[in-house]
Image (cartoon, rainbow, N blue to C red):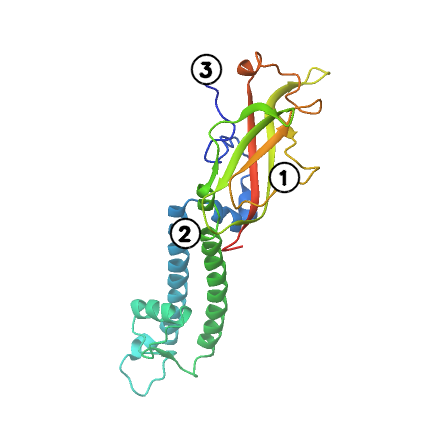
Amino acid sequence: KRKIQRYVRKDGKCNVHHGNVRETYRYLTDIFTTLVDLKWRFNLLIFVMVYTVTWLFFGMIWWLIAYVRGDMDHIGDSTWTPCVSNLNGFVSAFLFSIETETTIGYGYRVITDKCPEGIILLLVQSVLGSIVNAFMVGCMFVKISQPKKRAETLVFSTNAVISMRDGKLCLMFRVGDLRNSHIVEASIRAKLIKSKQTKEGEFIPLNQTDINVGYYTGDDRLFLVSPLIISHEINQQSPFWEISKAQLPKEELEIVVILEGMVEATG
């Protein structure tokens, strides 16, 4: 049997590779979507790196403030008021940065009111820390809540069939949901992917044609509680009208079925 490379694989992933992308900066202009689209291992690596870098950055600034003010030269001096009490090196400055940004507040290292630059830095780190938290936690939440795994419990029939139904020749396939939580506002549509040559001689290798599965009658909107048979009538408006039974095995075409809806449990 001749094997044709698929445009969309059985697991729903498009068999398309984007190459020779010159304007890669466009990915950075939409950094949130770029991070969400990354694989989990890169997401977790960036998550750890962002927090570590911010803690190290502000820890360095806290240490520089203490160093410039001369706090390092008066460690243990009860007559000296440091910017941050009990800050005696970069490690303690790094720990204070973590405690400040994560609002842990152990109480051992405390900023004093004799250090205006420290108060300003505290405000800046608190605000920027909240922004980093909102961005990174939001990114992880969207990543976790993506319904990719939900599609694993939506089952399509292995084969589509062409047969008579109510006296009409129809292309039919079945779809079902294995979960008890249903897909809300479910709708289905289908595309025929096939090469085409226009009257002007232009060759379109991946031309997309709509396959009517009940758009005009409302049959494309599904109540997917039990398995349903999706039917497409092969009439004069159908893209299969001019394909005979003998020609069908020789045709290089692909049918892509798209099922859309909202997950009842998560929305």
Name above or below for residue 36 compared with residue 109.
Answer: above
Give the residue pinned by disc 1.
220
Residue type (three-letter) at the residue carrying disc 2: Ile
Question: How far is the residue under mark 2 from the one under mark 3?
Answer: 44 Å
**Which numbered circle lies on residue 46?**
2
- Residue neighbourhood size for the residue with mark 2, other residues' Cα within 10 Å, grouped as few (<14), some (14–19), many (≥20): some
Q: Nearer the viewer, mark 3 or mark 1?
A: 1
Do residues under tags 2 and 3 come within 8 Å of each other at their CB atoms? no
Do residues under tags 3 and 1 come within 8 Å of each other at their CB atoms? no
Disc nearer the start of the sequence (3/1): 3
Give the residue pinned by disc 3.
2
Disc nearer the start of the sequence (2/3): 3
- Residue neighbourhood size for the residue with mark 1, other residues' Cα within 10 Å, grouped as few (<14), some (14–19), many (≥20): some
- The quarter of the displayed image where residue 91 is located: bottom left
For residue 97, side relative to residue 225 (left or right)? left
Please state which of residues 62 and 175 is positioned toward the viewer in this rendering: 175
Whether residue 57 is visible, yes or no, is yes
Residue type (three-letter) at the residue carrying disc 1: Asp
Question: How far is the residue under mark 3 from the one under mark 1?
Answer: 33 Å
